[in-house]
Amino acid sequence: MTDLFIIGAGTAGLSAAIYAVRAGKSVIVAESSTYGGQIINTPDIENYPGFAHISGYEFATNLYTQATSLGVKVIFEKVTGILDGHPFHIRTDHNDYEAKALIIATGARNRHLGLENEERLTGRGISFCATCDGMFFKGKNVAVNGGGNTALSDALYLAGICSHVTLIHRRDSFRGDKADLDKLNKCDNVTFMLDSNVTSLHGKDHLESIDVTNVKTGQTVQVPVSALFVAIGQEPDNQIFSDIVELDEKGYIKAGADCKTSHPGIYAAGDCRTTSLRQLTTAAADGAIAATAACTYIDRN
């Protein structure tokens, strides 16, 4: 039995844990992979207040260390289900737990292209993490698919170590930060392919080339690359919670700025919930709000 059970050890989950344990509650955080969430793979964070520059790894590690030093218990187990009741019953792939309140902070996972050969070539030229795998392709020609902040950041990082970077985006303009786009425009080894989609992947034992099709003209060109870094957004992993909290049509947990879900005693924080902005700052804020609300719920029940 614990006061608060938090699912996910990313920025939202760990921020919630810090607030809750400081409020005198016992806290367990369950994480299925590694602490930190997606941000742990970011080489340089420049938009978090108070830090002009900090790596995602350092940021996540500092957050994890802060939480555990305060007494938060982090378990590396995958939650497989939640049974309603007072208290809630949580099942993982290793144990069963009981908690007076829950916070779901599972974040979101990388969206795939859905192309033939994508699964076969993942890890053999297809990657979803430039900072994890970029050095394997030092001095080679690579491509990045996407138009948001992650894609621009990936392209900038790769431009510093790869021979050439082709940045492919389905629209005629990018959605990411202008500052990063300005930096990319100054790179001699970066080519933009706008209004375009990756439509085919080629390679026997590893990726050798990709087909890129212009959505306006229909023209397809084959681009020789050793790697393709896919950065086309994320999707939530909330289906196991669909029988206890309400999801929207995209699979995100319906929860507003107060982080309250459709079920009393269960809160959603960070990228897994319905929100117009998914950033470190909003994840940390969600964690604080959800934890405060959960502590109030526990005290009243």
Image (cartoon, rainbow, N blue to C red):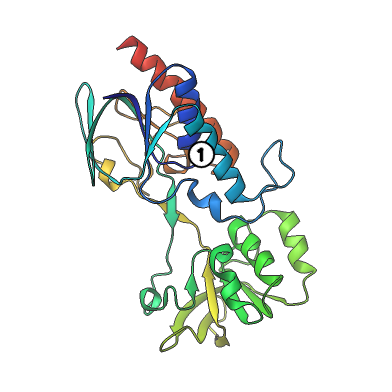
Residue 224, quarter of picture? bottom right
Residue 75 can be seen in this image = yes
What residue do we see at 73% from left, 77% from top? 189
Left or right: where 137 falls relative to 180 = left
Say which of 55 and 277 sits in front: 55
Residue 202 locus on image (x, y percent): 45, 86
Asked if residue 135 is positioned above or below residue 11 in the image, the reply reads: below
What residue do we see at 55% from left, 44% from top? 60
Asked if residue 41 is positioned above or below residue 23 in the image, the reply reads: below
Residue 168, quarter of picture? bottom right
Q: Quadrant of the N terminus?
A: top left
Q: Quadrant of the C terminus?
A: top left
Say which of 64 and 156 sits in front: 64
Q: Amino acid at mark 1?
A: Tyr
Say which of 53 and 224 sits in front: 53
Residue 258 can be seen in this image = no
Left or right: where 135 falls relative to 257 = right
- Mark 1, residue position: 64
Residue 45 locus on image (x, y percent): 66, 49
In this rendering, the count of numbered labels is 1
Q: Residues within 10 Å of mark 1 (few under 14, many from 20)?
A: many
**Which residue is situated farthest in the top direction here?**
300
Say which of 182 and 227 sits in front: 227
Residue 73 locus on image (x, y percent): 39, 33
Left or right: where 115 falls relative to 242 = right
What residue do we see at 50% from left, 30% from top? 69
